[in-house]
Amino acid sequence: MSTEHDTTRGMVERWGLQESASFDRHTIHNIQRAAATGIYDIRGFGAKRHLPHFDDLLFLGASMSRYPLEGYREKCATDVVLGDRFASKPLHLDIPITIAGMSFGALSANAKEALGRGASAVGTSTTTGDGGMTDEERGQSRTLVYQYLPSRYGMNPDHLRMADAIEIVLGQGAKPGGGGMLMGQKISDRIAEMRTLPKGVDQRSACRHPDWTGPDDLAIKIEELREITDWEKPIYIKIGASRTYYDVKLAVKSGADVIVLDGMQGGTAATQEVFIEHVGIPTLAAIPQAVQALQEMDMHRKVQLIVSGGIRNGADVAKAMALGADAVSIGTAAMIALGCNHPRWESQYHEIGSAAGFYDDYHEGRDPAGISTQDPELSQRLDPERGGRRLANYLRVMTTEAQTIARACGKSHIQNLEPEDLVALDIESAAMARVPLAGTDWIPGRSRPL
Amino acid sequence: MRTISLSETSVREVNRQLHDQTAELAEAQWRITDPEGRHALACGLDQTLEVEIDGHAGYYCAGMNQKARVTINGMAGVGVAENMMSGQVRVKGNASQSAGATAHGGLLVVEGDASARCGISMKGVDIVVGGSVGHLSAFMGQAGRLVVCGDAGEALGDSIYEARLYVRGSVKSLGADCVEKAMRDEHLAELRDLLDAAGIDARAEDFRRYGSARELYNFKVDNADEY
């Protein structure tokens, strides 16, 4: 029996139909959807368009001119210290892969608990999100970073003191310059109470902080947060990648201990698609800007850099760190590890007009995998213990993959990877990552071709 | 009462001593002198202390206050009593922008005027301003009550949720989804209580009430011009 796709392909071939590059089927669908509904498309996930990314970089493994380390026998350390610039209690993580901020509200309580269990099992941190801290999350996360967002939903000084670090969120890679959304169907009684909102309201989070307006004010805000927590907690500043070079310099000047840089492939629970796909710059382009800014201020490795936005495997971890990151953060990948977009729910994805591998309507709260939902029945589908084990497995695999690459490059610590270990497959990625095009000494914009 | 001069002691040391007060309250009453606009004074308190600041305070004075009563015998900078959870903060003079921003509880009294964004994103706090407030006050106000004995600037209560606003003087303009509402007996009663608690002599009957029309709670195509 032929599928609809086969039928369409057959007609294209038989009749010589030509699809427009400008008005392809996806574009036509979007125009028709807009005309029918009168509202822009809102969805979760991150940018889906093709972008220059870590896949466009390769490592130069050791041979004659470099000396590799023996796999499985010689140590390749993975630990990282975050926030030792001013904080008296910096974080000591066993692996440089952290869990990004995702709110209880966007995710179910079971999903938040599973993230905490998985991260704690391998010695890394999780992060709260818009809406505050839950008991499930604090209870299961050995190291918990508390986000301080423009909305200040659920913002509580007791939680601030219970956190291990504070992350001031200025922006997010999926929507730099925009605030969060949580649609009414996900504002349950518990979410409404935590956020002091009417149940069922379409929540529009603020895009700017309510009590400071620029880097000079931010410096004073950081001083206040440090005073409230007696200078114990590391203060992170999270930025969405856009004018990264300047933003990083201003964040350092404002007094950040750690900078979290989220590229445009970074995920979101609910944002306008036009925002996700058309605002911000790719992670690959942002990292060198951030590192340059830190180096010019003599702050590289003193103010740590955490990179997120499209980190999927150990190779991505190693590449981000070779470009100068101290650690990475994962959100979408962590959700997939828990079971998001798993084929076991295929038939139920079809019922809501999606398919495994394509599901991104996190804002609707009907996630068959029970992760991006507040529906009590759906939420029960995710067992937090089993989800935590899957996440821990995934984090271990990513770590050993990154170690494998680091050893092959002769590094006894993942953090010793460097741009010199990398080449690029095409001109765009070479220019963005500021590494040579493979087989040449040419870095577009930096040096002349051979 | 313990008195500390900020000309001799750092903000860090003053806050450390205040934070060291446990529930037993070895020292319950404090006077801080010579603040000279220093920032983050008496922030993060979580015991039933009484703190007087003699002079002008900088940004975020009494920020995130819990239980304590803080009095500023002078002006207050940006974000006084921001995110307060409980207790009381009183500013004898004027307050700068974002007074009581995002605060969840307690009572903030500004005896003079408060600048723009007073009560922005308020989440349950009660704010009583003896004078006027600037533009965008109670912006996105979620819960709590804002009482303005003078006038209110432009866009009062823009994008407001369930906060209740009382203004005695003129309102330059109302923000999106903020409307005037009927003043019923229960509102007069709660307003009298708020004025009493603030120690401000004013007649509740002279005020008008404003709140959310609740038209923007859920996205509607017909409201596109308001977004």
Image (cartoon, coloured by chain):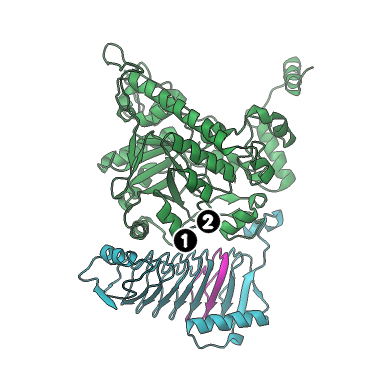
Chain colours: A green, B cyan
Q: Which residues are magenta?
A: B130-155
What amino acid is labelled 1 in the image? Answer: Pro
Q: Chain of mark 2?
A: A
Instruction: Say above or below: A62 vs B205.
Output: above
Distance, label 1 to label 2, CA atoms, is 8 Å
Amino acid type indicated by mark 2: Ala
Q: Position of residue A330 (x, y in %)?
A: 48, 36
- Which residue is situated farthest in the right direction here? A1
Viewer can see residue A270: no
Residue at mark 1: chain: A
Residues B125 and A4: in front is B125
Please tell me how many numbered marks the rendered image carries. Answer: 2
The residue tagged 2 is: A206
Is B136 colored magenta in this rendering?
A: yes
Is A319 on the left-hand or right-hand side of B119? left
Query: Compared with residue A441, is residue A295 higher up or lower down, i.e. above or below?
Result: below
Q: In the rendered structure, are the residues bearing label 1 and label 2 in contact, judged by CB atoms less than 8 Å apart?
A: yes
Judge by depth and name the residue closer to the eye, A448 or A237: A237
Residue drawn at the location 29% of the way across and 38% of the way down:
A301
Q: Based on the displayed image, in which of its 4 quarters is residue B8 positioned?
A: bottom left
Q: Please state which of residues A317 and A122 is positioned toward the viewer in this rendering.
A: A122
Q: Residue at x 42, y 46 (%)?
A: A238
As drawn, the label of residue A210 is: 1
| Circle number at residue A355 | none
Q: Residue furthest left?
A: B8
Q: Is residue A206 visible?
A: yes
| Quadrant occupied by the C terminus of chain A | top left
Residue A333 placement (x, y as % from top left): 52, 33
**Circle 1 crowding by C-alpha within 10 Å: few under 14, some 14–19, many from 20:** many
Left or right: residue A419 versus residue B134 is left
Q: Position of residue A243 (x, y in %)?
A: 41, 44
